[in-house]
Image (cartoon, grey):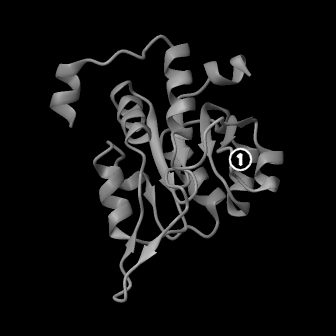
Amino acid sequence: MEARLQKIKAFVFDVDGVLTDGGILATAEGDLFRVFDAKDSFALRMAYMKGYHVGVITGGVSESIRRRFRTCGVPEENIYLGSRAKIEDFEDFCAKYSLKAEEVMYFGDDLPDIPVMLACGCGVCPSDAVDEVKAAADHIATRAGGKGCAREMIEAVIKMHGKWELDVQDYKSKF
């Protein structure tokens, strides 16, 4: 596993069930509300500040998703909303940065994520992912979706690369 993690240059995430606990509140007007873990979000910022490429591929379609990840440093062009064939968006993301699939860690929790998890360098799922995804994953996080599973692995990779140190001035200038 360590050899796989040494190659990681990018992180890509599903949203619902990975960066949230999967719960969605819906208003009568159709607005959808999600709860994100602040520690996961900070880890995304650290990845961005340390030069890793970060992307989001989700079946969800909401401006709130786009806005949330823009505040974490995810470039607009790396936020794929309404994805129905996640592997195609994953391949687009990789091509954009001339990344090999093995250089990307992907986080998913449900059936649409399996093709990407099998294609990427390290497929990660939260502890409460569906059984089929757990079987396809290279690593099952100790934490559930929306409860720090992304932070767990982002931090592990960045620490392995010797970069897990906050530069306050850099953080202030970027966020």
Q: Nearer the viewer, residue 132 or 96?
A: 132
In the displayed structure image, the side of residue 16 where residue 166 appears, left or right: left
Where residue 116 sits in the image (x, y, percent)? Answer: 69, 51
**In the image as oriented, which residue stretches furthest toward the bottom?**
28
In the displayed structure image, the side of residue 56 where residue 30 appears, left or right: left
- The residue at which mark 1 appears reads as 117
Residue drawn at (43%, 15%), measured in percent from left and top? 163
Q: Nearer the viewer, residue 22 or 58?
A: 22
Q: Judging from the image, what secondary structure is the residue with disc 1 in?
A: helix
Q: Is residue 77 above or below residue 107?
A: below
Q: Nearer the viewer, residue 95 or 103?
A: 103
Where residue 2 sits in the image (x, y, percent)? Answer: 70, 17
Q: Quadrant of the rendered structure where residue 105 is?
A: top right
Residue drawn at (37%, 82%), measured in percent from left and top? 27
Number of numbered discs on residues: 1
Residue drawn at (54%, 48%), measured in percent from left and top? 13
In the displayed structure image, the side of residue 95 where residue 53 appears, left or right: left
Task: Count residues near mark 1 (Cα–Cα under 10 Å), then give few for <14, some for 14-19, many for 20+.
Answer: many
Residue drawn at (36%, 46%), measured in percent from left and top? 74
In the displayed structure image, the side of residue 33 where residue 11 appears, left or right: right
Q: Is residue 111 above or below residue 153?
A: below
Q: Is residue 143 above or below residue 159?
A: below
Quadrant of the snapshot with the C terminus: top left
Q: Quadrant of the rendered structure where residue 168 is?
A: top left
Where residue 155 sits in the image (x, y, percent)? Answer: 50, 25
Q: Quadrant of the rendered structure where residue 130 is?
A: bottom right
Where residue 78 sits in the image (x, y, percent)? Answer: 43, 51
At label 1, the amino acid type is Met
Quadrant of the snapshot with the N terminus: top right
